[in-house]
Image (cartoon, rainbow, N blue to C red):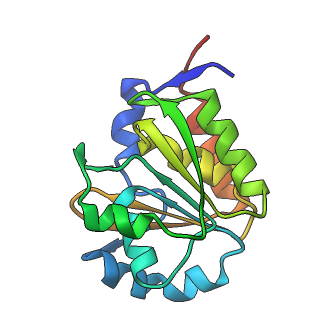
Amino acid sequence: MGLLLLPDDLRSLLKEPLGKLCRGDGLDCVRAMERDLERAHKLVAVGDMTAYYLLKAGVVPDLLIVDNKTKRMPVSDQVLDELDHKSYKTMPVQNPAATLSGDLMDLIRESIQGQDKIKIIVEGEEDLATLPAILYAPLGSAVVYGQPNEGSVLVDVTAEKKLHIEELIKRMIVEE
């Protein structure tokens, strides 16, 4: 698959949470989600601060998707240290802003299907990685991502949610 570009009409739609929004501080959100996170078949964290707060709370996701930035600025050394968790095998991938590269989508699919804990470090931007994470995660999994200036979003992976994500991805512009 080539590169998928985010069309303008989807930008505003994707600003809405794809799951349950937990408003507030990262650790408070992790505590509020704890029961759902424990039940999850697989757990995916998208975004550096999301991954940081989960790990800080002792929750170790199966897959981390990070770009070493928060709000377009480099994350602190403290965040980098926490994300440098010994459980993870690190995989780099290229993904330009406002896109989903075929390489990123393939890596997410392979990582979720495997047994190893993987940390994908995106060179570019990881914002849209939530979509393939939901699409490829097994039913009963959870995907957590940050909602800028609001909190964290918990997405329960259901058949309906996967269908919704498939429809959104189909609306993206394919660039070969």
Could you say where residue 107 lies in the image, as x and y percent from the top left? Answer: 66, 42
Q: Quadrant of residue 142?
A: bottom right
Could you say where residue 141 lies in the image, as x and y percent from the top left? Answer: 67, 68
Horizontal relation, residue 141 to residue 123: left or right: right
- Residue positioned 61% across, 51% down in the render: 133
The reply to whether residue 163 is in sight is no
- Residue positioned 39% across, 70% down in the render: 82
- Residue positioned 59% across, 37% down in the render: 104
Q: Nearer the viewer, residue 162 or 115?
A: 115
Could you say where residue 10 lies in the image, as x and y percent from the top left? Answer: 42, 33
Q: In this picture, is 116 found above or below 136? A: below
The reply to whether residue 55 is in sight is yes
Q: Quadrant of residue 37?
A: bottom right
Q: Nearer the viewer, residue 12 or 42?
A: 42
Q: Nearer the viewer, residue 124 or 143?
A: 124
Horizontal relation, residue 92 to residue 135: left or right: left
Q: In this picture, is 176 found above or below 96? A: above
- Residue positioned 42% across, 24% down in the render: 7
Q: In this picture, is 164 found above or below 80? A: above
